[in-house]
């Protein structure tokens, strides 16, 4: 069952971001993703401003470094009190455990922490020829997901093609956050492993991440509502 559609706010700065959010009616506050472009341009202040407007936030910075550095960085990010943060599973189990420790506040609370398995722009040829990983994509993703689960994380970022297998291997409560969602009549862009919102709902994805199909639509609000409705329709038995 799809829990929500997350809009990727892939804008160059605060002005464009807030102008986009202003297009939604006052009572409609979609879950949004703040990624590297926007965060590096505007810093924590834009996160706080979006929060003040009532939006849940997925802070998508994909940390990947030595365990102590990631732990300290996560401790800083925990002060932003966002809903979801991530890192690269390729950093290994020790790094993921350190991240979880750094993200957890003294009172025991923390945002959800998820691990990126393989980017949805990565295809089998790149996996083998450039990353030198001979294991097939599906098994690579599942192995990374198992490491994340064993490290205490809440879920993974994976393509919608692998979501059902991740659930089967790691349990139904282990979250799958899936970019690479495109409408049936839309363009793929630089995504390689994609699925429609309806099919993603059928595949058991928890959170669908959509950027350009919504943000670059002629009517973004309508596109967002279409994505939510299609995902719900796909989730129905």
Image: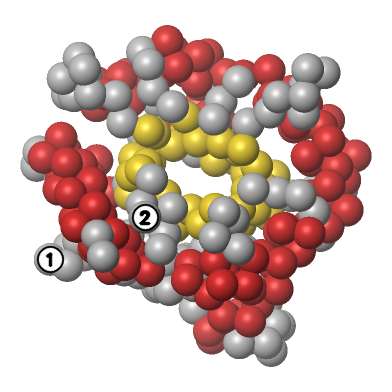
The picture quadrant where one finds residue 137 is bottom right
- Residue 119 drawn at (x, y percent): 53, 63
The picture quadrant where one finds residue 60 is top right
The picture quadrant where one finds residue 144 is bottom right
- Residue 155 drawn at (x, y percent): 61, 53
**In the depicted view, which residue is nearer to us: 18 or 28?**
28
**In the depicted view, which residue is nearer to us: 125 or 201?**
201
In this picture, residue 74 sits left or right of residue 121: right
- Point 62% across, 19% down: residue: 80
- Point 16% across, 41% down: residue: 225
- Point 57% across, 54% down: residue: 173
Q: Distance between the residues labelled 1 and 2?
A: 23 Å
In this picture, residue 184 sits left or right of residue 107: left
Q: What element carries label 1?
A: loop
Residue 187 in the image: above or below residue 133: above
The furthest residue to the front: 237
Badges 1 and 2: C-beta atoms under 8 Å apart? no
**Dot in front, 1 or 2:** 2
Q: Which mark is residue 27?
A: none
- Residue 95 drawn at (x, y percent): 84, 50
The residue labelled by disc 2 is 1
**Total number of numbered discs in the rendering:** 2
Q: Which mark is residue 185?
A: 1
In this picture, residue 91 sits left or right of residue 175: right
């Amino acid at each position: 069952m799809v829990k929500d559609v997350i809009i990727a706010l892939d804008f160059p700065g605060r002005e464009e971001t807030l102008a986009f959010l202003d297009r939604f009616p006052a009572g409609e506050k979609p879950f949004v993703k703040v990624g590297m472009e926007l965060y590096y341009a505007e810093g924590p202040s834009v996160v706080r401003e979006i929060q003040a407007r009532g939006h849940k936030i997925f802070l998508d910075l994909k940390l990947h470094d030595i365990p102590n550095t990631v732990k300290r960085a996560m401790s800083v990010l925990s002060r932003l009190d966002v809903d979801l943060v991530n890192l690269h599973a390729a950093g290994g189990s020790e790094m993921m455990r350190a991240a979880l420790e750094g993200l957890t506040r003294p009172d025991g609370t923390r945002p959800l922490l998820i691990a990126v398995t393989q980017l949805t722009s990565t295809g089998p040829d790149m996996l083998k020829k450039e990353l030198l990983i001979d294991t097939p994509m599906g098994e690579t993703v599942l192995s990374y997901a198992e490491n994340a689960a064993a490290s205490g994380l809440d879920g993974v970022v994976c393509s919608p093609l692998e979501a059902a297998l991740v659930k089967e291997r790691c349990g139904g409560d282990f979250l799958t956050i899936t970019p690479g969602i495109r409408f049936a009549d839309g363009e793929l862009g630089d995504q390689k492993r994609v699925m429609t919102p309806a099919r993603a709902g059928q595949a058991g994805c928890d959170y669908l991440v959509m950027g350009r199909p919504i943000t670059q639509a002629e009517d973004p609000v309508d596109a967002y509502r279409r994505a939510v409705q299609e995902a719900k329709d796909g989730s129905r038995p």
